[in-house]
Image (tube, helix red, strand yellow):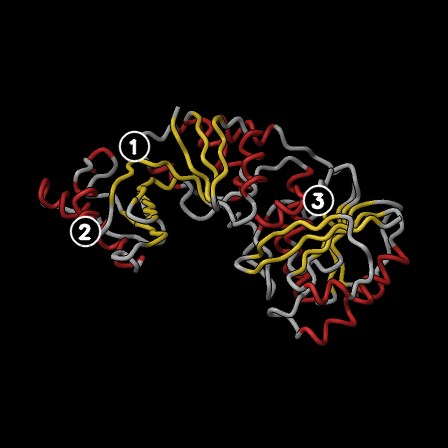
């Protein structure tokens, strides 16, 4: 059994913990912006392939006292780096956190890199080069107070970058947050789904992947663990094949996304094509004011602008009021969830929410509001 740590967005720790348990993780313990868990190598591969709400899966290799740069350098040098990489392999270091003496992540990362390549040079006369984009070995150093944890990063690129979404709108929702919202809204593939403000399609597409049991990691070409010395290609191929075999061919209930902006709907179509959902998820150009329910009951989830980037707050008051009117008049029998980062605007909806779930969209505190439309 190896100990792992999955990094997640603030506020999503309980959702990520449930997801890890479903994937077979043991000793699951949520922490601030992450979840500790343990398992075997197969679990590590499976979590990277299937994790819908996770950013990165780290494998801690050393925890140590680290009050300053000198101690950091010494501790990193005391690790036998021949176990992890040859001078012919590339390397990159990500740093998070800080303390009084180590308060610049770029400088801290440089100390780690220097300690490793100095050891290589002393032993072999050669050294690894740094490749920040696609390294053979990606390390993560996290500093908290006078302690540091050094980990191998098994994910490589952040898992929220699914690989299906080169086309994005102006204020895109991260795929991980979209997946968490579907979980919090208790979205079930048996119910029709509508996002009437879908932008480049993240919520409908994440709903489609979930409904068809498609692993989000299938669109990634590479994970960090693939260039590790202990990479088990056969095991990985088995886990990947198992995921492909478990996919469903057809949706049980339709998924719709619409937006007034033709160019973002074109992006949504492109993204749907990239994840093989172009024939399954229906996108259309539609003004919110003209929207009609596509079925008698269903779930509506949307992320309307809340004056952070798209349109100013005072212009949005009328829109939120209309949104409430349309939901009340047209969507009887539906359940609606609205993500908003502005309390004043949500008051204008004029409906009583039955649930208010605190969330973060990036660093912005938001609420996911549930409306039961009787």
Q: Quadrant of residue 125?
A: top left
- Residue 15 in the image, given as x and y percentages of width and height: 59, 40
Q: First in sequence: mark 2 or mark 1?
A: 2
Residue 216 placement, left or right of 44: right
Task: Report helix, strand or loop for mark 3.
Answer: loop
Residue 360 placement, left or right of 330: left
Q: First in sequence: mark 2 or mark 3?
A: 2
Q: In the image, what residue occupies the spot 86% across and 45% down?
A: 297
> Label 3: which residue?
185
Q: Quadrant of residue 76?
A: top left
Callout 3 crowding tier (Cα within 10 Å): few <14, some 14–19, many ≥20 = some
Q: CA distance from mark 1 to mark 3?
A: 41 Å
- Residue 183 in the image, given as x and y percentages of width and height: 66, 41
Q: CA distance from mark 2 to mark 3?
A: 47 Å
Task: Report helix, strand or loop for mark 2.
Answer: helix
Q: In the image, what residue occupies the spot 88% across and 46% down?
A: 333
Residue 229's tag is: 1
Dividing the image into 4 quarters, which one contains the N terminus? top left
Residue 255 placement, left or right of 7: right
Q: CA distance from mark 2 to mark 1?
A: 22 Å
Callout 1 crowding tier (Cα within 10 Å): few <14, some 14–19, many ≥20 = few
Q: Nearer the viewer, residue 268 or 116?
A: 116
> Label 2: which residue?
114
- Residue 258 in the image, given as x and y percentages of width and height: 75, 58
Q: In the image, what residue occupies the spot 24% across and 46% down?
A: 66
Foreground mark, 2 or 1, reads: 2
Q: Nearer the viewer, residue 90 or 95?
A: 95
Q: In the image, what residue occupies the spot 57% across and 39% down?
A: 14
């Amino acid at each position: 059994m190896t100990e792992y740590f999955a990094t997640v967005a603030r506020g999503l720790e309980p959702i990520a913990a449930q997801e890890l348990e479903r994937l077979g993780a043991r000793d699951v313990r949520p922490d601030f912006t992450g979840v500790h868990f343990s398992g075997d190598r197969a679990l590590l591969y499976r979590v990277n392939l299937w994790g819908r709400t996770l950013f990165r899966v780290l494998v801690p290799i050393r925890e140590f006292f680290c009050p300053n740069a000198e101690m950091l350098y010494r501790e990193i040098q005391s690790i036998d780096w021949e176990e992890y990489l040859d001078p012919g392999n590339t390397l990159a270091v990500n740093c998070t956190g800080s303390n009084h003496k180590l308060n610049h992540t770029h400088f801290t990362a440089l100390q780690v890199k220097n300690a490793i390549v100095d050891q290589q040079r002393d032993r072999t006369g050669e050294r690894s080069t740094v490749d920040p984009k696609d390294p053979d070995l990606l390390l993560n150093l996290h500093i908290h107070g006078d302690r540091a944890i050094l980990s191998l990063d098994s994910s490589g690129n952040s898992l929220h970058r699914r690989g299906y979404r080169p086309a994005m709108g102006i204020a895109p929702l991260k795929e991980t947050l979209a997946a968490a919202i579907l979980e919090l809204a208790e979205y079930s593939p048996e119910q029709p789904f509508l996002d009437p403000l879908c932008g480049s399609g993240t919520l409908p597409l994440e709903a489609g992947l979930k409904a068809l049991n498609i692993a989000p990691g299938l669109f990634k070409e590479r994970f960090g663990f693939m260039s590790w010395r202990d990479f088990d290609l056969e095991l990985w191929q088995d886990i990947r094949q198992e995921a492909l075999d478990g996919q469903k061919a057809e949706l049980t209930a339709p998924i719709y996304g619409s937006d007034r902006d033709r160019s973002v709907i074109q992006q949504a179509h492109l993204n749907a094509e990239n994840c093989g959902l172009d024939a399954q998820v229906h996108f259309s150009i539609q003004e919110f004011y003209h929207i009609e329910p596509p079925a008698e009951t269903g779930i509506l989830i949307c992320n309307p602008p809340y004056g952070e980037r798209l349109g100013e707050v005072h212009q949005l008051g009328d829109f939120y009021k209309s949104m409430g009117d349309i939901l009340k008049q047209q969507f009887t029998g539906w359940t609606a969830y609205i993500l908003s980062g502005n309390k004043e605007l949500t008051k204008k909806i004029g409906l009583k929410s039955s649930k208010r779930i605190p969330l973060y969209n990036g660093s912005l505190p938001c609420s996911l509001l549930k409306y039961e439309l009787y």
